[in-house]
Amino acid sequence: MREQKKPRQLRPAGGQAESRRLRLLVLSLTVLIAISLLSRLPAWSLLELRSFDYLSTVDDPRPPPGGPVIVAIDEPSLADINAQWPWPRSLHAQLVRQLRTAGARVIGLDIIMAEPSNPENDDAITKAVGPDVVLAGDETLIETPQSSQLIRATPLPQLTEAGAVTGIASVDLSGDGAFRRIPGYEDGFAAMLMKASGAAPKALPAGRLIQSFGAARSYPTVSYYQALDPENLLPPDYFKGRVVLVGLSLQNAPAIDKGGVDAFATPYTVHTGTLTSGVEIQATIYDNIRRGLSIAEARLPLVAACILISVLLAAATVWRSTGWLTIVASAVAMLAFAAASFAGIRFAHVFVSPLGPVVAYVSVAFGQAAFDYAEERRNKRQIIRAFAQYISPDLVKRLSNDPSQLKLGGERRTLSVLFSDVRGFTTIAETLKDEPEQLTGLINRLLTPLSDVVMDHGGTIDKYMGDCIMAFWNAPLDDPDHALYAVKASLAMQAAISSLNRELEREAAARGGRPHVLKMGVGINTGECIVGNMGSTRRFDYSCLGDSVNLASRLEGASKNYGVALLLGEETARLVAGTYTVIELDRIIVKGRTVPSPVYTVVHKADAEALAAHRAFTQAKYAGTLAPSDPAFDRLAADIPELAGYYAIVRDALAEAGEE
């Protein structure tokens, strides 16, 4: 029998399982926080409402029995009546009388009659209305830079004095212009229809989501001209005992991209692309109030609990591994969340958006799958990945020939370690805090030539620390002249800084600004270190550590205290003394050490007599016999101008000590 292959899974190695699970937990927490932040965005709310549109209409609910009947002011009526709109109010009065005669329980005119018209027409409608007639009002918020003004348009006083009831027909629209919510008016048009019919409307909080009942023309609808002659043009008792709404309702619902008169997008618009007339929307509101069908949005604790459950389910799904089953599980989960949300709408009249749980589940499941895939790729390309951690091309070649060296560990070697740092770069960065592109460009222009200098002199760059570079010589390959090349590199770096400063000065002059002058301090020390692959089993760098490395870093930091750009440790100075003129500046105890360390610098122009005078100067300083008034300060500053700043610093220090 042929063996069946199991589906391929991305599984972590045993030693990586713990870190993988920790990463999964971090991913889950990150997703929770991210969704919490995203849910505060208006775009997120609109996406949730769009999901409501689909779910609340998926089973195509129809209007409840016994609901309103609509008399439409539509194209056939406009053609039959053949009068310019707005029609005379005497015609509406005739309609009211006909509907009342036909047995209509309540008549709602979704027509604003706030301004006087022809007196005869106004008298006609006044005589026709009564307590069984609800007239539409309107409320509009006018906002200007100076103020906000709420304007309410209500029917003519003579109509309400005649017994007609006023109902505000304004609707609230979501951010995308769609109608989805019960308007927040106690005297809303639909609520007043219910009161006029003798029924008490159910108390519903404003803003609840509405249950739609189909696309445009879903409610029983007749044309206006038919309602003017119901005995001859309509079935018997068509209006008997019914609530009748009268308003504009075009026979062909206008397309959503063209707009329309008193027509709005509803949840069904996502299916049909058409708008629904305002009078039919009032009928929908009426049935929601009458039957208690409006839908409450879930409160924050319930939403948060659903998202948390989704995250936990996703984490459980990918806890051990990810693979093609992750896709299947995600699809099932998305369908389950949508089904649960639909059930909440239809049976509990509560909307819990599936968007948050779906995004949470997919983000955790596919996020972990992406991590696992990347981990597998990294494992397959371990050698290539490790090579990228090294800077020296010679090291890449050596490791490609002997991959066994790709393990943690190191060896004891004598290295020359260099630290360089740009002085005052924090101040420069502060001045460019509002121009991050310029700051990034400046760092790149600085580090590129300095790195090239190190590489050209056979050094290995250990790391970058902002504007600081750490490099070393004599590893991974042997270099008997490592100290000499380190010092040569430091001097070349100073030359590169000077060249960059000239470029910056020219650029600043061209734009009429002030240049950023860069000054660098360098510390070099030679001594025994541990060098090798340092880090963890998952990520490591070829680096070095030890007391000699720490001293090199301290020397770089101390260079500014001596007014020089370069400070050398004792062993480095000894190794390069045959090539460069090195001068001892001081014996210091740097932080982290208890033994005084002599520090040196390199000078280029100093004769034997000046060097001898400098040695006598330092001996006097060590002995404490040097005074600020000693003529040696001025003489040496003239003979060795490179150290003029150093002599000034020593003199100032002695003067301050004398004052104390």
Image (spheres, grey):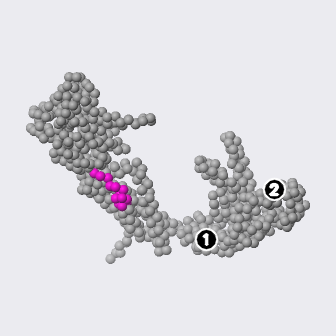
Q: Is residue 375 above or below residue 260?
A: below
Q: Is residue 428 above or below residue 365?
A: above
Q: Amino acid at mark 2?
A: Ala
The one of 440 and 495 positioned closer to us in this rendering: 440
Residue 16 numbered tag: none
Q: Quadrant of the N terminus?
A: bottom left
Q: Quadrant of residue 353?
A: bottom left
In the image, taking residue 1 as reference, residue 609 lies left or right, namely right
| Residue range of the region highlighted in magenta in the rendering | 295-307
In the image, taking residue 87 as reference, residue 435 lies left or right, namely right
Mark 2–mark 1 distance (CA, rounded to whole Å): 44 Å
In the rendered image, residue 422 lying in the magenta stretch gets the answer no
- Residue on which the image places disc 1: 533
How packed is label 1: few (under 14 Cα within 10 Å), some, or many (20 or more)? Answer: many
The one of 383 and 575 positioned closer to us in this rendering: 575
Dominant secondary structure (helix, strand or loop) of the stretch shown in magenta: helix
Q: Tag 1, which secondary structure? A: strand
**Foreground disc of the pair 2, 1:** 2
Residue 648 numbered tag: 2
- Residue drawn where x is 23% and y is 50% of the image: 292
Evaluate whether residue 59 shows in this view: yes
